[in-house]
Image (cartoon, rainbow, N blue to C red):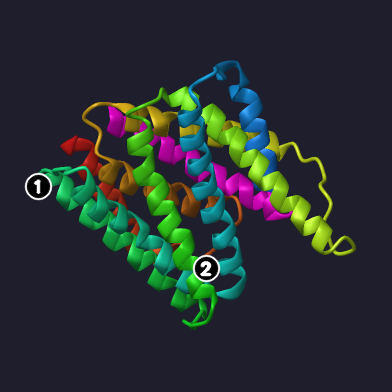
Amino acid sequence: MWIWLTLFSAILLGSYDIVKKQAVKTNSVLWVLFGATALSTLFLSPFFSPGPLENHLRLMAKAVLVSLSWISGLIAIKMLPLTTVSTIKASRPMFVLIFSLILFHEKLNLLQWGGVLLVIAALFMLGRSSKKEGITFSSNSGLAWMVVSVLTGVASALYDKYILGLMEPLFVQSWTNLYISLIMALVLLGDWLRDRRGFRRFRWDWKLLLIAVLITGSDMLYFFAVNEEDALISVISITRRSSVLITFLGGALVFRENNIRDKFIDLVIMLAGVIMLLFSS
C-alpha cells in the first residue's frame, strides 16, 4: 500500500512543480513558497493538537532542515548552471538509499534493487542531458550551497522515518508546516529590511491556492506512506523523485518546451524503474 501512496504523492508533487513554475511569474519564489506553506497550514489547522514539548522541538528541527534545503537550493540555482544543479540534485535519492541501509538496516529485494538503480540512472541522465541545451558545467561557491541543499534534504527524509515512529502523520504535517511558515516569514522580513526599495512585494494569485492543495495532498500521502510499518524510506524517496515524469510532461503540454525528445530515453528508463518498484512492493 505504501508504494501506491508514494506514487500518487509523486504525481501530485509533479503537478505542484508545474503550477509553481507558472506562479513565479507573478511572485518571487520565496513568496510562492511562503504563500503555499501558509495556506497549507490553514488547510491542516483542524488537525492541530497539543503535544509534549520534546515533540515540538523535533518538528522545529524538521522545519529548519526543510527551510535550509529550500533556501540554499534557491541560492545555488542563481549561481550555477542548470546541468550542475540537476546532476547534484539527482544524487539525493542515492544518499538516502545509502544512509537508510546503514541507519535503518533496510533490505531491498532483487526487483526493488533493479527499480532503484534504473530510477537513479535515469535521474543522472536527465541531469547530464541538460548539456545538450547549451549549458556547461562550472565550479564556484554555488556548489557549496547546492551540497548544503542536498544534504539537508537527505537529512530531512531520513529524519521523517524517525519522527513518524513517534508521532502521527497529521500531527507532524500540520505543525511542521506552521513552523516552516514562520521561518519563511522571517526570511522574507530579512529580505525586506536588507533592501526595501528592491523588495518584490506580494501579489495575490489564485494559483497559490492550487499549489497549496497539491503540496498538502502530496505531503499527506508521503507521510502516511512513511508511517506504514513495512515502508522502505529508500524506495519511497526514489519513487517520489519520479515526479519529474509529470514535470517533463507538463513542460511539453503546458509550456510547449521542445526538449522532451532529447530526454525521452531517460524518461522511459525512469518509468521502467517505477513499474519495477510497484510490482516488487
Quick one: which residue is furthest to the left in this view? 110
Magenta region, mostly helix, strand or loop?
Answer: helix
Q: Label 2 neighbourhood size at 10 Å, few (<14), some (14-19), many (20+)?
A: many
How far across and down, in percent of the image, does residue 81 sit? Answer: 53, 75
Residue nearest the observer in this picture, 118 or 52: 52
The N terminus: image quadrant:
top left
Which of disc 2 and disc 1 is earlier in sequence?
1
Q: Is residue 13 magenta?
A: yes
User: Which residue appears at 59% of the width and 57% of the height?
Assistant: 71
| Residue 158 image position (x, y, % from top left) | 34, 45
Give the x, y percent position of residue 72: 56, 61
Residue of label 2: 145
Is 75 above or below relative to 61?
A: below
Left or right of residue 114: residue 248 = right
| Disc number placed over residue 110 in the picture, else none | 1
The residue at the point 49 percent across, 67 percent down is 146
Task: Tell me, yes or no, whether the highlighted magenta stretch contains residue 82.
Answer: no
Instruction: Tell me the quarter of the picture where residue 200 sits.
Output: bottom right
